[in-house]
C-alpha cells in the first residue's frame, strides 16, 4: 500500500473519466445558458454563518461541515452546498432581478462514504432570485428534467410537493409533532431523535417500522393557505402543459431547512434508495432575508454530478467519447523531428501526440496504437535523408505513403478525412 492515499470520501478523477466530467458540465452549460442563465463562481469557503442560515435543524449544518478558524481568527467553512453562497453573493452585489445564475463545482460534507455518497462531491445547479412566478418554478423543474433527457437518462422520476407558506409549514410541523408524539412507542429510536429536532424530517425516514405511522400522518395539503394552494396548482398545471411526468409526493420534505412552497426531487431508477436522489431543489423565499438582504423570492436546484454519472453508467448512456488524439508522430532519428512536426500539426489545429526517449520503432508504434490516433507520421533516417515523412493510416485499408515534408499538413488532413 502506498504511504499516501486519498482520505475517506475523497477521490481522484482520472482520464478518461475526467473528460466525461467536463463534457457533463459543458452539456449542462449549453442547456441552462440557452435559457438565459449566467454562470456564477462562488468561493469554496465562506463565513460559517452563511451556511448556518441553511438551517440549524439539518445534519448538513450541525454535523457535516468542514469548518476551521483561519489565521485571521475568522470561523470559516468549506461550502456544503452553493445556494447559500449564491444568496450571499446576491445580497453583496445587488444585481438586477430576476437574477438567473448557474454554477458547477465541488461541495464538502462530512458524511459516511459509500457508493454515490462522498465527502467531496460535485453539483451543477441553478438559482433564480427575485421572481415569484409559479411558471418560473415550472421552468426550473423542466430545465433539470430536460438536462437528464439530454444525457440520455430515461429512468429518472420526478417527485413534486409544496411545503406551503412559512405559516402553513409551521402549523403543519406542529400537527406532525402532535401526531408522532401521540404515537411515540411506534416510532423508531432514530426518528424519535429526529422528532425533537425537526418533525418534518421524520417523513423522510426510510425505516420500515416508521412506514405505517408516516402513512397515517396529517398531509400538508390541508394546511395550505389560498395563495400557497393557488401557486402550487399553477405549478402542477404547468408541468402538465409541458408533458413532464411527475408524482405528487406529500412526504417530500428535502434535507435542508430553507424550503418553502414548491419542492422537487429527481430520482434515479437504478441506485440504492438511500442514494437515489440524483438532484433536487425548491423555493427558499426567506433565505436572502436571513442573510441580511431584502425580502426576495428564490428558487433553484442542484444536481449531483457523481450520482448522475452512476445512473448514466447503470443505464448505459452518456459514455465517454473518443478523447484521444488524431495523429501520433513516430521518430526514430532522435526526437527533434517529432518536436517540430508535433508543433506544426498542433498549430494547424490537428491534435497529435508523440513518443519520447528515442525508443525502437516497434515500441513507438505501440504508443501510437494506445493513443487512439487514426494516423501515424513516421520519420526514420531514410525519410530524414529524403526530406519526406511516411503517413500511415492506422485504421481501415488505406495504404501508407511517403509525402514531402513541406506537404505534411495537407497530406495528414487528407489521410484524416
Ligand atoms: P441537496 O439535496 O442537499 O440539495 O443536494 C443535491 C444533490 O447533490 C443530491 O440530490 C445528490 O445528488 C448530491 N449530493 C448531496 N450530497 C452528496 C454526497 N455526499 N455525495 C454525492 N452527492 C451528493 C442542495 O444541495 C440544495 N442546495 C439544492 C438547491 C438549490 N435547492 C435550491 N437551490
Image: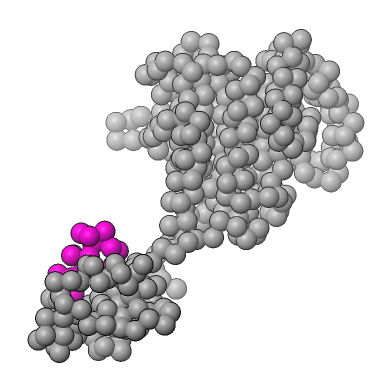
Residue 62 in view in this figure:
no
Residue drawn 76% across and 11% down? 225
Q: Is residue 406 magenta?
A: no
For the residue pair 307 and 256, the one nearer the viewer reads as: 307
x and y, in percent, of residue 141 in the image: 63, 32
Q: Is residue 347 magenta?
A: yes
Residue drawn 41% across and 33% down? 39
For the residue pair 241 and 55, the one nearer the viewer reads as: 241
For the residue pair 83 and 103, the one nearer the viewer reads as: 103
x and y, in percent, of residue 139 in the image: 60, 28
236 left or right, relative to 150: right
Residue drawn 43% across and 79% down? 396
Q: How many marks?
A: 0
83 left or right, relative to 213: left
Quadrant containing the C terminus is bottom left
Quadrant containing the N terminus is bottom left
Picture quadrant of residue 349: bottom left
x and y, in percent, of residue 146 in the image: 60, 40
For the residue pair 136 and 306, the one nearer the viewer reads as: 136
Picture quadrant of residue 163: top right
Residue 394 in view in this figure:
yes
Picture quadrant of residue 310: bottom right
x and y, in percent, of residue 21 in the image: 47, 53
152 left or right, relative to 341: right
Residue drawn 29% across and 35% down? 71
- 69 is higher (above) or lower (below) than 373: above
Part of the protein shown in magenta: 338-355
Amino acid at each position: 500500500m502506498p504511504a499516501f492515499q486519498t482520505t475517506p470520501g475523497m477521490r481522484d478523477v482520472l482520464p478518461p473519466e475526467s473528460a466525461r466530467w467536463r463534457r457533463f458540465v459543458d452539456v449542462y452549460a449549453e442547456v441552462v445558458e440557452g435559457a438565459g442563465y449566467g454562470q456564477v463562481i462562488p468561493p469554496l469557503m465562506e463565513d460559517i454563518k452563511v451556511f448556518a442560515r441553511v438551517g440549524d435543524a439539518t445534519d448538513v449544518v450541525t454535523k457535516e461541515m468542514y469548518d476551521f478558524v483561519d489565521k485571521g481568527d475568522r470561523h470559516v467553512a468549506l461550502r456544503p452546498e452553493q445556494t447559500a453562497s449564491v444568496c450571499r453573493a446576491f445580497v453583496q452585489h445587488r444585481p438586477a432581478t430576476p437574477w438567473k445564475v448557474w454554477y458547477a463545482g465541488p461541495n464538502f460534507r462530512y458524511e459516511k462514504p459509500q457508493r454515490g455518497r462522498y465527502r467531496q462531491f460535485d453539483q451543477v445547479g441553478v438559482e433564480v432570485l427575485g421572481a415569484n412566478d409559479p411558471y418560473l418554478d415550472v421552468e426550473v423543474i423542466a430545465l433539470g428534467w430536460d438536462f437528464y433527457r439530454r444525457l440520455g437518462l430515461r429512468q429518472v422520476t420526478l417527485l413534486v410537493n409544496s411545503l406551503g407558506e412559512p405559516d402553513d409549514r409551521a402549523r403543519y410541523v406542529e400537527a406532525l409533532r402532535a401526531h408522532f408524539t401521540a404515537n411515540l412507542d411506534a416510532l423508531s429510536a432514530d426518528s424519535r431523535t429526529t422528532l425533537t429536532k425537526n418533525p418534518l424530517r421524520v417523513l423522510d425516514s426510510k425505516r420500515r417500522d416508521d412506514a405505517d405511522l408516516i402513512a397515517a400522518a396529517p398531509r400538508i395539503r390541508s394546511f395550505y393557505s389560498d395563495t400557497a394552494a393557488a401557486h402550487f396548482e399553477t405549478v402542477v398545471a404547468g408541468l402538465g402543459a409541458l408533458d413532464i411526468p411527475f408524482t405528487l409526493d406529500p412526504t417530500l420534505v428535502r434535507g435542508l431547512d430553507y424550503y418553502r412552497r414548491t419542492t422537487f426531487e429527481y430520482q434515479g431508477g437504478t441506485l440504492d434508495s438511500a442514494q437515489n436522489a440524483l438532484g433536487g431543489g425548491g423555493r427558499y423565499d426567506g433565505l436572502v432575508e436571513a442573510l441580511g438582504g431584502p425580502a426576495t423570492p428564490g428558487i433553484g436546484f442542484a444536481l449531483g454530478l457523481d450520482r448522475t454519472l452512476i445512473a448514466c453508467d447503470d443505464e448505459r448512456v452518456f459514455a465517454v467519447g473518443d478523447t484521444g488524439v488524431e495523429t501520433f508522430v513516430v521518430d526514430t532519428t532522435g526526437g527533434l523531428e517529432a518536436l517540430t512536426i508535433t508543433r506544426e500539426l498542433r498549430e494547424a489545429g490537428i491534435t497529435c501526440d508523440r513518443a519520447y526517449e528515442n525508443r525502437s520503432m516497434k515500441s513507438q508504434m505501440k504508443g501510437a496504437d494506445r493513443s487512439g490516433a487514426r494516423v501515424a507520421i513516421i520519420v526514420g533516417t531514410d525519410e530524414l535523408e529524403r526530406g519526406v515523412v511516411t503517413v500511415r493510416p492506422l485504421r481501415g485499408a488505406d495504404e501508407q505513403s511517403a509525402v514531402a515534408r513541406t506537404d505534411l499538413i495537407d497530406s495528414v488532413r487528407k489521410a484524416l478525412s
